Amino acid sequence: MIGVVQLKRGKERKIHNFYPWVQRGECRADGVEDGAVARLVDADGKFLAVGTYNAKSRFQFRVYSLEDEPLDRGFFAKRFLTAIELRQGLVKGTNAERVVFSEADGLPGLIVDRYAGHLVVQVRSLGAERLREEWLPALIETSGAVSIREKSEMAGREEEGLEAVTGPLFGEPPATVEIEEDDFRLTVPIETGLKTGYYLDQRETRRRFEKRVEPGQKILDCFCYTGSFTLRAARAGAVAYGVDVHRPALETARENAKANGLESVFVESNAFEYLESDALGPYDWIILDPPAIAKTFEKRDSLKWAVWKLVHNALPILKPGGRLIVCSCSYQLGLQELVETCRLAASDRHTRLFLEDVTFQDRDHPAPIHFPEGLYLKCAWLRKGP
């Protein structure tokens, strides 16, 4: 007999409308163990959903199904197959993609990325952790994976009452995997790299960027990581500079440049400091793709300040008519606020900026419109006025 979590009156509508979270203060649960599977009911006791409960979390109940069904191996096998089928033919020109995107695929707290047949998994919630014995065999069975590595190191696990966990889950996962992306050969550090090893969500933005770069232009790629934007610029014939503070990532970036017969300059430096002291400008393009910084509403101001500072310091070294691509990978800073923050920085520099384009996460990272938090990545393409 599984436990019961009861919603407060008036909170059931969002569940009916496919919102997958019940937040702290919206429900009550007597005797339900943290991380346990439970049934969600409305204030009158009517069934709403099956999911997992954790009193410690900001999101105390996570919806897995609107049907009253067991969350067993068969359930997960069906969900994995649906996610895999959804992505067939969706992303072309690469053998690396996101296979499971948590709530967007009806699998809260679980991320799965595929790199040339090797999977990297992130477990983000206590509920998903407790269900490991059900979903892991189902993932092995349905995915055809050569190996599976876990990289559950995100800060959010602490709030869930979990410690960081990394290591092999199936087969013999390599430390690095070579992938293909639009005729690039790229090494992905799936053991020591950031997130699952590579930023798959920026694929479409990278493609558009390469098409717009012109030979001879000068490009600065801040927070370049393993160099994917930098190398796109170099292949387009630009003079490309990548800056990052993460030394191992820069070593991989240099390896990627060499493997693809490209020349780029990679600088180990804090991007905030580099922008203030850079003497290599002016640039035709500057890419600003900082880490999330703010994962909660309370820390949103820190992210806005960081974006303001980056744009404020980038504008003096950007040519008139030059372009900025300013990215936010946090839901807490929406597109309107991102553009407004750029406007404030430009106004403080007495500089005009024009919004030319907007890109979002690629299609293997689906964004359900009933779950606004699922649309986390947005990139504003800005042109500096004369």
Image (spheres, rainbow, N blue to C red):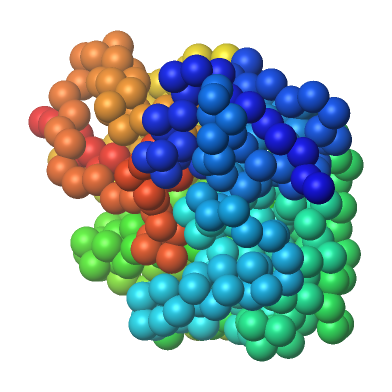
Task: Tell whether 164 sits left or right of 332.
Answer: right
| Quarter of the image with the C terminus in it | top left
Percent position of residue 83, x then y: 50, 70
**Is residue 230 visible to the viewer in this orientation of the structure?**
no
Determine the residue located farthest toward the top in the rendered image: 348
Q: Nearer the viewer, residue 349 or 115?
A: 115
Q: Nearer the viewer, residue 197 or 35?
A: 35
Task: Tell whether 380 sits left or right of 253.
Answer: left
Q: Nearer the viewer, residue 186 or 145?
A: 145
What residue is drawn where x is 50% and y is 18%? Answer: 9
**Is residue 101 visible to the viewer in this orientation of the structure?**
yes
Determine the residue located farthest toward the left in the rendered image: 386
373 vs 86: above or below: above
Q: Quadrant of residue 113?
A: bottom right
Q: Quadrant of residue 161?
A: top right
What residue is drawn where x is 33% and y is 44%? Answer: 369
What residue is drawn where x is 71% and y is 84%? Answer: 141
Q: Nearer the viewer, residue 351 or 359?
A: 359
Q: Quadrant of residue 196?
A: bottom right
Percent position of residue 180, x then y: 51, 82
205 vs 82: above or below: above
What residue is drawn where x is 53% and y is 54%? Answer: 67
